[in-house]
Image (cartoon, rainbow, N blue to C red):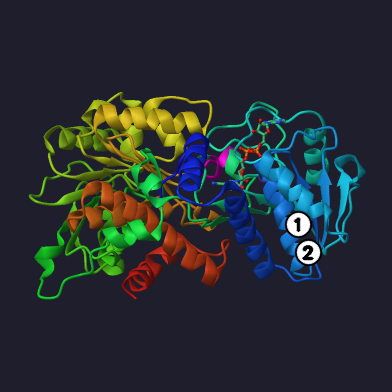
């Protein structure tokens, strides 16, 4: 799914309006989508306090108030009486609202903090039109609303957030439990500093002009199931193990054998035809007994000392590798002559960063840093928006694919495109999750998925397995090894 900027969404609105629907009817459609969602998710015993601004976000709020009232919900509407220059469509909806005697319209200042479980706040103060920090009465009311423990639903965007960038320093932002947003994810929903204000996000389709959307250029995308279903290649019958490629996982060191075992098992579970593990001798018994389908190639006693190059194989290197001096040398030697596809993770990235050897990363390689590893490789940035910009520059400069692991992992391609992944959950924030991802990616690339597609599919599959784990075991109890056991369920889900 494309992510458009606030400016592009505004243009998309106009294009949609140009194709026959009037702007007031588009607002009606957007508001109806919200009212229907609320009706499906809340009981009529709930009372809604609807806070409305003076722009079209406020207009949505007025229309939602009317619609909820018509659905038998109890509603109260709050406006900023100092700011009465309403947009044309907000004015029309406010007028309609005033004709309903059962709805009270009050000033922001008359709201006092309450603790009623049956009350829900709707924030329709500002949407994507916000162009400066909140101040005055709108800042005051958001601060007050944030102090209440009652549930909050933001319409389109939590008031105070910009659609496409970080908020200003010390800005006030509504902390929502739900964000009902129209048609598109906004970039700010997907970054940790801003996304934490959104709560659960529901994207509501309002039929904006599809031709305009198709023609609009963007470098930002959300990985949705449509993309995945286009990428996924069901396993063909009449094939043999050679058809599904050769994956070689390289890593493990004395006391860190689990990491490379998890990568190996993940590569196997993702469908690799032939899977090898290059690890030190001390890992032999563990790997052979825990991953009998994989073949073991020893290198060194306690630490990897040499990395052999096997023809026509895809390498995944780094999990549990350690940073012993002999391992570092082996990595440099290997990278100097290796020419095929490769996934570089964990200690392999740290070794390259610490020795200033980033230039050894081959073109078309996939690197999978978490924010700290990324910083070691490419330097410090002020925030996650800047980090992603730096990642785009580096992916282009080095012609590599970067999978930046975070709450919403992002796949960054050499042509500067960013694909945000929205599967996965905080239960995956545990040592070992990354090792599973490395195995998945290596396996997909060895099965001849194009590298960019393998990255997108791999990030999504990893997160989806995590979501299945959270459902079954809880975010607390789920383990990276459980992720491996759920890879099969994800493939079954895709092929059903
Ligand atoms: N396609 C869609 O997604 C649709 C969205 N709709 C809704 O419309 C809003 C956007 O409406 P807009 O009138 O452009 O902007 P806002 O209501 O967000 O803001 C109003 C207005 O306020 C001024 N302003 C900006 N920042 C501040 C500030 N800090 N303090 C005071 N005033 C401020 C500025 O002039 C803004 O223009 C979208 O989010 C949806 O909710 C449509 O209803 C249907 C289609
Ligand atoms: K809002």
The residue located at (30%, 32%) in the rendering is 395
Whether the residue under disc 1 has CB within 8 Å of ligand 1: no
Q: Secondary structure at mark 2?
A: helix
Q: Are marks 2 and 1 in contact (CB under 8 Å)?
A: yes
Magenta includes 63? no
Residue 447, position as x, y percentages in the image: 18, 59
Q: Which mark is residue 69?
A: 2
The residue located at (38%, 27%) in the rendering is 378
- Vertical placement of 290 versus 256: above or below? below
Which image quadrant for residue 57?
top right
Residue 201, position as x, y percentages in the image: 58, 54
Residue 52, position as x, y percentages in the image: 75, 45
Q: What residue span does the magenta drawing correspond to?
A: 188-193
The residue located at (34%, 43%) in the rendering is 215
Residue ID for mark 1:
65
Identify which residue, 231 or 266, lies in the foreground: 231
């Amino acid at each position: 799914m494309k992510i458009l900027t606030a400016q592009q969404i505004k243009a998309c609105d106009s294009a949609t309006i140009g194709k026959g629907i009037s702007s007031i009817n588009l607002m009606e459609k957007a508001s109806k989508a919200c009212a229907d969602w609320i009706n499906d998710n809340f009981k009529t015993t709930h009372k809604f306090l609807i806070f409305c601004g003076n722009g079209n976000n406020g207009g949505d709020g007025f229309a939602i108030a009317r619609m909820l009232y018509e659905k038998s919900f109890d509603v109260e509407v709050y406006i900023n009486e100092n700011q009465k220059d309403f947009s044309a469509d907000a004015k029309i909806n406010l007028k309609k609202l005033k004709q309903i005697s059962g709805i009270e319209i009050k000033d922001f200042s008359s709201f006092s903090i309450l603790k009623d479980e049956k009350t829900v706040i709707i924030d329709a103060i500002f949407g994507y039109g916000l162009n400066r920090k909140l101040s005055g009465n709108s800042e005051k009311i958001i601060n007050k609303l944030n102090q209440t423990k009652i549930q909050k639903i933001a319409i389109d965007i939590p008031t105070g957030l910009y659609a496409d960038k970080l908020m200003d320093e010390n800005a006030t932002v509504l902390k929502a439990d739900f964000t009902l947003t129209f048609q598109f994810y906004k970039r700010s929903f997907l970054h940790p500093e801003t996304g934490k204000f959104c709560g659960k996000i529901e994207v509501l389709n309002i039929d904006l002009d599809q031709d305009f959307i198709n023609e609009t250029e963007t470098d930002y995308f959300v990985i949705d199931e449509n993309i995945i279903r286009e990428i996924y290649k069901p396993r063909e019958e009449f094939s043999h193990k050679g058809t599904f490629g050769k994956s070689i996982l390289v890593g493990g060191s004395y006391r860190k054998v689990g990491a490379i075992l998890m990568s190996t098992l993940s590569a196997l579970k993702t469908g690799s035809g032939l899977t090898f593990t290059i690890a030190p001798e001390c890992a032999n018994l563990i790997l052979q007994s825990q991953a009998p389908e994989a073949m073991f190639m020893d290198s060194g006693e306690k630490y990897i000392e040499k990395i052999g190059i096997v023809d026509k194989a895809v390498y995944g290197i780094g999990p549990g590798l350690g940073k012993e001096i002999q391992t570092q040398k082996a990595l440099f030697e290997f990278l100097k002559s290796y020419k095929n596809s490769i996934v570089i993770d964990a200690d392999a990235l740290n070794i390259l960063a610490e020795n200033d050897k980033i230039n050894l990363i081959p073109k078309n390689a996939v690197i999978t840093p978490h924010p700290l590893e990324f910083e070691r490789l490419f330097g410090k940035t002020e925030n996650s928006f800047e980090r992603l910009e730096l990642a785009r520059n580096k992916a282009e400069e080095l012609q590599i694919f970067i999978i930046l692991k975070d709450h919403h992992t992002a796949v960054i391609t050499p042509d500067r495109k960013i694909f945000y992944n929205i599967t996965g959950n905080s239960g995956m924030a545990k040592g070992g999750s990354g090792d599973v991802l490395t195995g998945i990616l290596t396996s997909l690339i060895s099965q001849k998925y194009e590298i960019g597609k393998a990255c997108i599919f791999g990030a999504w599959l990893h997160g989806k397995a995590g979501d299945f784990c959270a459902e079954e075991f809880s975010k607390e109890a789920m383990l990276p090894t459980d992720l491996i056991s759920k890879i099969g369920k994800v493939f079954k889900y895709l092929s059903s």
